[in-house]
């Protein structure tokens, strides 16, 4: 087997915020919803923070939570579990979770695990808000 | 060359993505490999007490990525079964098996070595 060696440059994201979460309260046709915009890369190294942030929002008992994934470049299974957990919690308290605009890598893990059959996925925030 | 990592998984993903593209994997397959490697490396972050190492190479047929750490997987076959959809854990290695063309796994007291194979088009 002829192996071609990997170039020796290294990439470092240290010191860069890997994940940013913005939460805003919004309204669509008189119905309030919570919009959560998740940007960056979500993996096991920041799942605890993500889960804590989302749990805080769930405890506010929103009728609808929309998570905008358009700025999320990557999501691993631990972050996916955080989303599934939110979905379950909201469902129990009579709320609804919707996901918006996942990039290809994120759409792939949602599809592969069939999480996209459990949580509705929309192309835009407006569509998700309209239900 | 060997790439060592502790918790900087974004750096691991960047290395793998760039190399997979350079090797000729199409975009969606490169993303598959990135996901698989990240899931394996996440296990190092969760369970191993020391850094993991990554080696990646390719020939005319395939891209191969080997990840080693000092952790131990007690039931390697478990990862071939799909976890319940709302299971709160255990999807990681199952995903690896789904997106890679071939997965070799060797785990014991000395640690775990996982080799991921991705066929090149053509």
Image: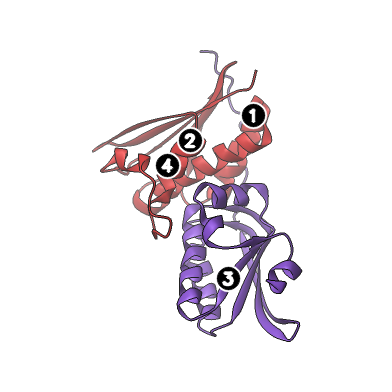
Chain colours: A purple, B red
Residue B73 is situated, as x and y percent measured from the top left of the image, at 30, 43
Subunit of mark 3?
A
**Residue A121 visible in rendering:** yes
Q: Nearer the viewer, mark 3 or mark 4?
A: 3
* Residue A128, numbered label: none
Residue B108 is situated, as x and y percent measured from the top left of the image, at 25, 36
Between B73 and B97, which is closer to the camera in this rendering?
B97
Whether the residues at callouts 3 and 4 have beta carbons within 8 Å, the answer is no
| Residue under the image location 58 percent in, 82 percent down | A62
Distance CA(mark 4)–CA(mark 2): 7 Å
Is residue A8 shown above or below A110? above
Whether the residues at callouts 3 and 2 have beta carbons within 8 Å, the answer is no
Subunit of mark 1?
B
Q: Residue furthest front?
A: A131
Is residue B48 shown above or below A124? above
Distance CA(mark 3)–CA(mark 1): 35 Å
Q: Nearer the viewer, mark 3 or mark 1?
A: 3
Q: Secondary structure at mark 2?
A: strand
Badge 3: residue crowd in 10 Å (few <14, some 14–19, many ≥20): many
Distance CA(mark 4)–CA(mark 1): 24 Å
| Residue under the image location 38 percent in, 51 percent down | B83
Distance CA(mark 2)–CA(mark 1): 18 Å
* Residue B25, numbered label: 1
| Residue under the image location 61 percent in, 52 percent down | A106
Say which residue label 2 marks.
Answer: B54
Q: Secondary structure at mark 1?
A: loop
Say which residue label 3 marks.
Answer: A97
Q: Nearer the viewer, mark 2 or mark 1?
A: 1
Badge 1: residue crowd in 10 Å (few <14, some 14–19, many ≥20): many
Say which residue label 4 marks.
Answer: B52
Whether the residues at callouts 4 and 2 have beta carbons within 8 Å, the answer is yes
């Amino acid at each position: 087997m002829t192996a071609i060696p990997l170039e020796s440059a290294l990439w470092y994201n240290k010191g860069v915020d890997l994940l940013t979460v913005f939460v805003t309260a919004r309204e669509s046709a008189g119905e309030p919803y919570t919009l959560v915009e998740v940007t960056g890369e979500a993996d096991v190294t920041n799942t605890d923070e993500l889960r804590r942030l989302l749990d805080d929002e769930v405890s506010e008992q929103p009728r609808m939570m929309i998570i905008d994934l358009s700025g999320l470049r990557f999501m691993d299974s631990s972050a996916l579990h955080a989303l599934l957990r939110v979905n379950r919690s909201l469902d129990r308290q009579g709320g609804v979770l919707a996901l918006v605009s996942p990039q290809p890598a994120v759409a792939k893990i949602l599809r592969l695990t069939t999480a996209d059959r459990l949580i509705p996925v929309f192309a835009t925030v407006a569509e998700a808000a309209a239900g | 060359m060997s790439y060592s990592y502790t918790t900087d998984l974004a750096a691991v993903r960047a290395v793998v993505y760039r190399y997979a593209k350079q090797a000729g994997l199409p975009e969606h397959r490169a993303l598959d490999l990135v996901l698989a490697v990240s899931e394996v490396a996440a296990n190092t972050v969760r369970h191993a007490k020391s850094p993991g190492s990554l080696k990646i190479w390719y020939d005319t047929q395939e891209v191969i990525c080997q990840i080693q750490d000092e952790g131990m997987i007690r039931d390697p076959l478990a990862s071939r079964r799909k976890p319940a959809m709302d299971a709160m854990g255990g999807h990681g290695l199952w995903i690896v098996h789904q997106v890679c063309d071939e997965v070799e796994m060797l785990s014991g007291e000395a640690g775990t070595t996982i080799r991921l194979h991705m066929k090149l088009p053509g």
